[in-house]
Amino acid sequence: MTDTMIDMLGGLYGRERAAPLYRRLEKLFAGFHRRPGGAGGRYALTEKDAVLIVYPDQLNDGEKPGFEVMERFLLSYVRDAVNTLHILPFFPYSSDDGFSIIDYREADRAYGGWEGIRRLGKRYRLMFDAVLNHVSAKSGWFEEFCAGNEEFASYFITCDPDADLSAVVRPRSSPLLTPFSTSRGEKRLWTTFSADQIDLNYRNPDVFLRMVEIMLFYISRGAAVIRLDAVAYIWKEPGTSCIHLPQVHLIVKLFRLILDRIAPHVVLITETNVPHRENISYLGNGNDEAQMVYQFPLPPLIAHALLWEDSRFLAGWAGGLDLPGTDAAFFNFTASHDGIGVRPLAGLVPEKDIDGLVALTKQRGGTVSYKTNSDGSRSPYELNINYMSLLEKPGEPEEAAVRRFLLSQSIMLAFPGVPGIYFHSLAGSINDSAALTETGIPRSINREKLSVDRLVRELNENRRRKTVFSCYKKMLSIRRNETAFSPRAPFEVMHTNGAVFAIRRTGENGHRVIAVHNMSSGITEIRLVSGLQGKHRLRDLLTRKIFETAGDGCLSLTLGPNEFLWLK
């Protein structure tokens, strides 16, 4: 492991610097203190893993800090429906709802500080964000750079404004370079995401070592899963695309080697909102990069299948899914704190259908964020809309919209991998149009912060919230007790008529679950080859209804509008 690590450091920073850098890493390892109870072997992902994605101030009661309010709500209403919390950035920040970090080491006291994190970690595994690509323009590091402190002189990327950066792949339409006044005069700095988010310079090994140190600090504070935010962009080489460069993969490999050595219980997950093949490249050979990647094509493909009432594109993509090894897994989701990425749809659905999704988003109260292409043109990057609001047809009965949304979540939960549930999906939220109007920030539409008293009242009185919350918890409870939903359980897309999306999972001792979804808003009849020999009784885990196969093992079903079943 030592020789491999030195070789990788040499690949990044040159052979002469590799050994001294490794010695500096060794000092970091020596100073690392494992969280009590955190030491031990690797963490094996199972069907019991489910992640709830929350903001640190997601819930408020007007008095207590956000972590305390969240803890009380979870223990009273969610309990063990999930076993992991992804707490979105809880550090002091200046913009982007936490992703423009001022101080990596401070848990904001307004949320409850590190003590609040510790208390949540007593009940749930914790997932932290390692925001690798950039820091806030108000961070101490950047202030030192602007003041002329030599230690920070190469922490950031200055660039000649006349340099040819036309090949750089951008996830935004804002300027790539932003001018700043410094003690050395005006400097133009690389700002991939916004003028308030200054890109770090990983060509400087001190930056790499700082981020390793911060990652180890997070683990010492209870992180069991570390999300590598925007990792694809962290290494810059003018004249290239500056995305997915070989140095990026070397850095992820180094992170994995480090954690395998001193914190093997910690899981790495990469956030790369890009087409599928590029995305899964961050799993490496299945053992040497991240253990999980976000399944970015899944949210827009499910939405497309439901809105077009046609599962063929979803099924065609899903049928070709593969993983490089048994230690690797997908992180499945439909909604998150960001929008619904459409870049992963490239090549999976017709271009006109992407245009159709953009039009439907705008018709249903959302907005669309665009990126600038290398030729100067713009193309849609993400749909900024609540997932339920996107799926809801104008004027239809509320129960139909709820059923369609729950069907979308059933597909996500049945997919191979670990489910990630955004808080607003669990709570049955819709567009926060008022926030969008107030802030003018597209992503505000799906980032509502809730009064806990109002939420609890609506979970009892509001039909939409009550139905979604109770049904979602039921699905999670069933899922965690079925080995067929393990990330390692075999997965097969079943042949259907296009109106139905069906997948078969096989768990321990051959126990099978067939998840059947009518993507149509009408009644659909389907005949499925169950894979069983002779007559068998199948029970729907969700409703307890009994279905029988014919003598040839085929299963005939009549499905109501957007009906879904988990047949065991």
Image (tube, rainbow, N blue to C red):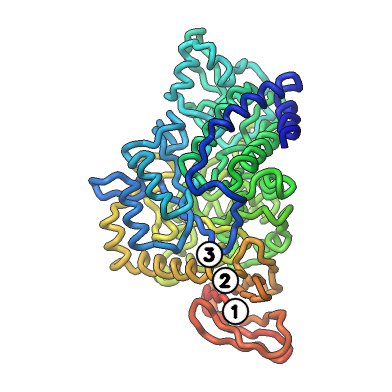
**Does 344 appear above or below 196?**
below
Kind of element beneath mark 3: helix
Viewer-side label of 1, 2 = 2
Q: Amino acid at mark 3?
A: Ser
Residue 482: assigned label: 2
Residue 405 to residue 145: above or below: below
Per the model, the C-alpha gap separating discs 3 and 1 is 20 Å
Location of residue 533 in the rendering, given as x and y in whole percent from the top left corner: 73, 86
> Which residue was labeled with disc 1?
568
Residue for badge 3: 408
Label ID, residue 108: none
Q: Amino acid at mark 2?
A: Glu
Instruction: Tell whether label 2 touches label 1 (CB within 8 Å).
Output: yes
Counting from the top left corner in percent of width and height, residue 427 is at 39, 60
Q: Image point 54% across, 43% down: which residue? A: 226
Question: In the rendered image, is residue 433 in sight?
Answer: no
Judged from this view, the residue extending furthest toward the top is: 184
Helix, strand, or loop for circle 1? loop
| Outermost residue to the left | 63
- Please report contact status of discs 2 and 3: CB closer than 8 Å, yes or no: no
Image location of residue 165, percent across then percent down: 66, 24
Mark sitting earlier along the chain (3/1): 3
Query: What is the number of callouts on the image?
Result: 3
Please indicate whether residue 451 sits to the left or right of residue 40 in the image: left
Residue drawn 32% across the image and 64% down it: 459
